[in-house]
Image (cartoon, rainbow, N blue to C red):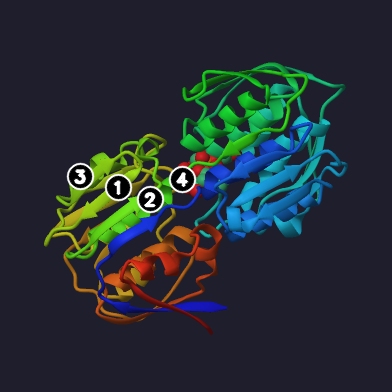
Amino acid sequence: MDKFIIEGPTPLQGEIAISGSKNAALPLMAASILGDSPSTLDLIPKLRDIYTFNNVIRVTGTKVDFQEDENRLVIDPTNLSHTEAPYDLVRKMRASFYMLGALIGKMGKARVSLPGGCAWGPRPVDLHLKGMEAMGVDIDLDGGYVVASIDGEEVEGGEYTLDPSSVGATINLVLAAAKRAKKFIIRNAAKEPDVVLLCNMLVKMGADIQGIGTDTLTIRKAEILKGVEMSNDPDRIETGTFMIAAAMHPESDLTLTGCKPEDLGTFPKHFKKLGVDLTINGSTIRIQSKNSVNPVSVKTEIYPGFPTDLQAQWATLMTQADGESKVTDTIYFDRFSYVPELNRLGADLKVEKNRVTINGKTELTGASVMSTDLRASVSLVMAGMAAKGTTEVLRIYHLDRGYENLEDKLNAAGASIKRVQE
Ligand code: UD1
């Protein structure tokens, strides 16, 4: 198992290029299966979750060619014949569950393992299944697998209201309906950029989807979906992470290139309250930090609100703010496993239900800390870059799931991060 050894404190200066989005790439990969010819996807990051999903897709007989030097994936589903997504792959990554919608769409049937638990508490898939049933798909559970099928070539459809709104359920339902439902309406649908990009790809393939980008999606089946060329979006969570990381040191001057600022929702509005200089110019974002950071409380919300995938990083930044702040997660109630680790570095955070109170400013000093999930892990790296002395971050395999070349990018901007084998 690898670990990071980080020497700090170091500012972030210079340029970092943003990679393609992990969370947006996965649904595009699932959509490629629905085509009657190969699809080519660009700006696909080289991440463990992408390799895992490549393998999930390959089990079906689909050909997957990852041209890594070009960050390009070519997915050829013409020989797809097998409709199972097995447990040993699905358990590695929840998003493999998108195979349910993709295989129903493609073959009218699917046998997909239920995803396991998660580092931050229960993450059910009940809405995915209830939505499918509302569409007219038969769903059975058999030994930890969801067995889904439709009677004939199509289902009537109907409508389903997601409560709460769910990114994953919206994606799965859209994938299933695009080739199978006479007319299906998803209410309270997720509006995240990842959902919009997926819908845009499906429309390019020939799908009929109305209401893209709103909370009501109406899907009418298309007889044929063709393979297309599609470019993935830049990663908005990576963008936000590096913005926050830069603000943690008073001498940072960091420029992020290849961003899509319009995908950041209200995040820049919150960021500006820090008192840090933020300049957005086309696809470039520049962060020039100041001697002090204002305490800014945030509450996570569905898009365009503050993303839950940035709350751990924000709480980490707040350890360097002059005063008390609170971070409340309304999407996941138990996503604070990073808190005891930050406190080991000298921070002062207290969790109460779904809210963490951060008492800043605290001087951080290096120690050994343990990664627990993807976003918690990157927060510990950020804290290590702000801490005096040597910080060891153990179990960094979580980071390899979701941040492309993290240490190379940060080191090129002035950090001192070494990857060593434990
Ligand atoms: C996606 C992202 C994840 C992000 C999350 C919220 C991917 C691969 N993952 O996860 O990084 O943190 O969106 O922005 O894109 N819920 C149910 N029943 C369901 C499904 C969801 O109750 O069947 C609840 C969840 O427990 C949660 C809320 O709905 O409270 C939102 O979850 P959801 O949007 O589905 O998250 P994911 O798609 O799993």
From the viewer's perspective, is 241 left or right of 323?
A: right
> Do tag 4 and tag 2 residues touch (Cβ < 8 Å)?
yes
Label 4 vs 2, first from the N-terminus: 4
Q: Nearer the viewer, mark 3 or mark 1?
A: 1
Residue neighbourhood size for the residue with mark 1, other residues' Cα within 10 Å, grouped as few (<14), some (14–19), many (≥20): many
Q: Position of residue 342 (x, y in %)?
A: 33, 69
Residue at the image position 26 percent from the left and 72 percent from the top: 10
**Is residue 340 visible from the viewing direction of this image?**
no
Farthest front residue in view = 70
Q: Secondary structure at mark 2?
A: helix
Amino acid marked by disc 3? Lys
Give the distance between the C-alpha atoms of the residues marked 3 and 4, in whole angstroms. Answer: 21 Å
Q: Nearer the viewer, mark 1 or mark 2?
A: 1
Q: Which mark is residue 234?
A: 4
Label 1 vs 4, first from the N-terminus: 4
Q: Which mark is residue 272?
A: 3
Amino acid marked by disc 2? Thr
Q: Which mark is residue 285?
A: 1
Label 3 vs 4, first from the N-terminus: 4
Residue neighbourhood size for the residue with mark 4, other residues' Cα within 10 Å, grouped as few (<14), some (14–19), many (≥20): many
Give the distance between the C-alpha atoms of the residues marked 1 and 4, in whole angstroms. Answer: 13 Å
Quarter of the view holding residue 100: top right
Q: Secondary structure at mark 4?
A: loop
Residue at the image position 30 percent from the left and 80 percent from the top: 366
Depth check: give the residue in front, 171 or 112. Answer: 171
Give the distance between the C-alpha atoms of the residues marked 3 and 1, in whole angstroms. Answer: 13 Å
Give the distance between the C-alpha atoms of the residues marked 3 and 2, in whole angstroms. Answer: 15 Å
From the viewer's perspective, is 396 left or right of 93?
A: left
Label 3 vs 1, first from the N-terminus: 3
> Do tag 1 and tag 2 residues touch (Cβ < 8 Å)?
yes
Residue at the image position 61 percent from the left and 45 percent from the top: 26
Depth check: give the residue in front, 307 or 299. Answer: 307
